[in-house]
Image: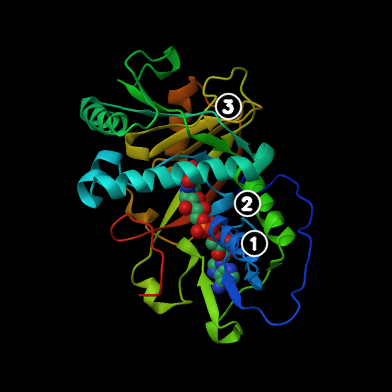
């Protein structure tokens, strides 16, 4: 089925709420960013209205791999080199607190499993070892693994991150949306903002990430959309990968759900056609993902769901937040 396994979970309709009076802030985009923003503003007593073109979590937030990871887009030792030690440590600590907050809000959409980052060759092993040393020096909980279980015999080392977790991402963001409604926010699904001139609030938050195209020309110049494709199998006989695993600098990622389905994504490297905002499957990436499933479990189980999602990449790999440039 060409849609997200996570979004296929039946969900009750979002409770509706209408604001009394005009909104002070309008948010465009109902993914994890927009819903978090709506919750924070509503809790602070701000009259906030959110517009989502599809359904809550209908973008990347309901189409991802379900990895809840500490840290930023770049490895920690590189972040120390580019941001400086103090800022890198502060950023990583901030993301740990973010994980704590997810745990407190997500209920059964989050499992505190830890994650495993793997090295596929000696070069990646050296990079990983450098990151491990930097994290350990700065007091972050990590463990180095030379010995790997038989199902990971193709890898040459790994690092466990204990503070990470596994999400059912659509369930999580829908829950976040419910918290925002409870706090007083108005969330409108099926509400595409065609032009910022159509909005009434004096302040507008753009939370459209990789789906931003055309709304704010200044952002088109800095957000590069990247497509990622994912497949999910029917439940496997064994639970071999009970927490998020990722390798080849994140280009391969996989985990099993509690009912033993294997969720596998990535394999987009060396394929420039994935630098696109078109949310479509391609035979080339799908074939690579199927081969990877065979590498992991020795045969090709039935694929139950296939989907694509778009995320946004910034020029320097740092979060893009603040006033429109
Ligand atoms: C396949 C894939 C796997 C990934 N795996 C992981 C992972 O395992 N862990 C992780 O942390 N990150 C992962 N990511 C990245 C992560 O999903 C995104 O960083 C995150 O979901 C972005 O959230 P967001 O709310 O900013 O954007 P989105 O969730 O994309 O939300 C943007 C929303 O804006 C809406 N929108 C756009 N234009 C308009 C408009 N004009 N009017 C109204 N609404 C509009 C869209 O419909 C969309 O719902 C992955 C991404 C993909 C695509």
Judged by depth in the image, the label closer to the viewer, 3 or 1, is 1
Specify the quadrant of the image occupied by residue 15.
Answer: bottom right
The residue wearing badge 3 is 301
Across the whole image, how many numbered discs are drawn on residues? 3
Specify the quadrant of the image occupied by residue 51.
Answer: bottom right
The residue wearing badge 1 is 43
| 25 vs 208: above or below | below
Q: Which mark is residue 246?
A: none
Residue 92: give x, y in percent of width and height: 38, 43
Disc 3 and disc 1: Cα gap in Å?
46 Å
Q: Is residue 279 visible to us here?
A: no
Judged by depth in the image, the label closer to the viewer, 2 or 1, is 1
Confirm if mark 2 falls within 8 A of ligand 1: yes
Disc nearer the start of the sequence (3/2): 2
Disc 3 and disc 2: Cα gap in Å?
29 Å
Judged by depth in the image, the label closer to the viewer, 3 or 2, is 2
Look at 40% across and 75% down and name the residue there: 324
Crowding at dot 1, Cα within 10 Å, few <14 / some 14-19 / many 20+, comes out as some
């Amino acid at each position: 089925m060409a849609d997200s396994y996570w979004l296929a979970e039946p969900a009750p309709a979002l409770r509706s709420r209408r604001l009394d009076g005009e909104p002070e802030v309008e948010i465009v985009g109902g993914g994890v960013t927009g819903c978090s923003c709506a919750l924070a503003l509503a809790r602070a007593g701000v009259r906030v209205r959110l517009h989502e073109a599809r359904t809550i979590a209908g973008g990347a937030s309901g189409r991802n791999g379900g990895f809840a990871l500490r840290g930023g887009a770049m490895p920690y030792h590189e972040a120390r080199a580019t941001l400086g030690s103090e800022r890198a440590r502060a950023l990583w600590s901030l993301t740990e607190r973010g994980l704590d907050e997810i745990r407190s809000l997500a209920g059964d959409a989050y499992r505190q499993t830890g994650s495993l980052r793997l090295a596929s060759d000696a070069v990646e092993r050296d990079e990983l070892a450098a990151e491990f040393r930097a994290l350990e020096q700065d007091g972050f909980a990590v463990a180095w693994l030379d010995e790997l279980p038989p199902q990971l015999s193709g890898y040459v080392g790994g690092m466990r991150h204990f503070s990470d977790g596994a999400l059912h991402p659509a369930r999580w963001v829908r829950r976040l949306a419910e918290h925002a409604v409870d706090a007083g926010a108005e969330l409108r699904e099926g509400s595409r903002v065609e032009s910022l001139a159509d909005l009434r609030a004096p302040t507008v938050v753009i939370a459209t990430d990789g789906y931003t195209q055309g709304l704010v020309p200044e952002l088109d110049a800095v957000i590069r959309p990247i497509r990622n494709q994912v497949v999910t199998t029917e439940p496997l006989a064994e639970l071999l990968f009970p927490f998020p695993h990722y390798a080849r600098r994140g280009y391969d990622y996989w985990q099993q759900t509690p009912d033993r389905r294997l969720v596998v994504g990535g394999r987009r490297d060396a394929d420039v056609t994935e630098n696109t905002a078109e949310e479509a499957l391609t035979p080339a990436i799908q074939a690579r993902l199927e081969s990877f499933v065979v590498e992991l479990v020795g045969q090709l189980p039935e694929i139950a769901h296939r989907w694509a999602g778009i995320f946004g990449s910034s020029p320097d790999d740092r979060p893009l937040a603040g006033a429109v440039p």
